[in-house]
Amino acid sequence: MRLETSLVREPGERPLPSAMRGRTRHAPGRPRERYRPRVRTPEDVARLRRRHVPVYLLTDEEVGRAGYPVRFPPWLAVAESIAGSVESDFRVLPVRDPASLVDPGLPELVTLLLRTDPLAARAVAIRNRGRLDPLELYRRVRNEGLERTATRVRLQEVAPAIPEVGVRLPARDLRWVDRNNPPIRG
């Protein structure tokens, strides 16, 4: 058994450009226009976002602007409900709460980083402590079910409302990581 999801165009909506559509089989009793969006470039992501599809491209430049210089291939954050129907050259990161991808800010960035690089998530949260809303970070971590990962890197220092679940890394080791990853100057 396999679960299959797809996007269905509502009456009156313009279709995606043909370069971004891959045809799927027509199931009996379903609308004829079923497609699987293809996401190959950042422009494709921007085009889908303009059509209100819950996607977001997490890039190393975005993390660098938040104060943590790091290099990694981009991740495509996609609402969990449609993650199976998106074809992408990027690595796909399913997100439970599609509303978090509409206008992602610092809490969403930290939450996405918790799934890909927890130490980077901690560094971004600590370096942006004054700009980061701890209650919003708590809400995002809870919505995504990342309490265990947040506890491991001690995000309770930034958002005390996050419940402690599981084992924490030693504070001495995390202080060493913080000292040896100085913030960007400039």
Image: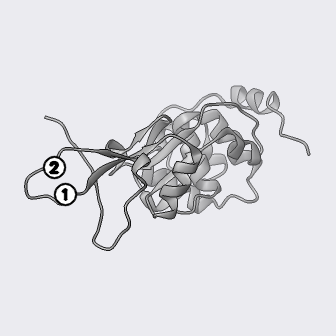
Residue 137, quarter of the rendered image: bottom right
Mark 2 Cα within 10 Å, few/some/many (few <14, many 20+)?
Answer: few
**Along the viewing direction, whichever of 37 and 84 lies nearer the viewer:** 37
Q: Which quadrant, please, contains the N terminus?
A: top left
In-front residue for pair 132/68: 68
* Residue 165 visible in the snapshot: no
Q: Residue at x 51, y 59 (%)?
A: 49
* Residue 135 position in % (x across, y down): 58, 62
> Label 2: which residue?
26
Amino acid beneath label 1: Arg
Q: Position of residue 101 (x, y in %)?
A: 51, 57
SS at circle 2: loop
Say which residue label 1 marks.
32
Query: Mark 2 and mark 1 in contact (Cβ < 8 Å)?
Result: yes
Q: Is residue 68 above or below residue 143?
A: above
Q: Earlier in the sequence, mark 1 or mark 2?
A: 2
Q: Position of residue 32 (x, y in %)?
A: 19, 57
Q: Position of residue 144 (x, y in %)?
A: 44, 49
Mark 1 lies on a secondary structure that is loop
Disc 1 crowd, CA 10 A, few/some/many (<14, 14-19, 20+):
few
Q: Residue at x 68, y 58 (%)?
A: 132
Residue 82 appears anywhere in the view: yes
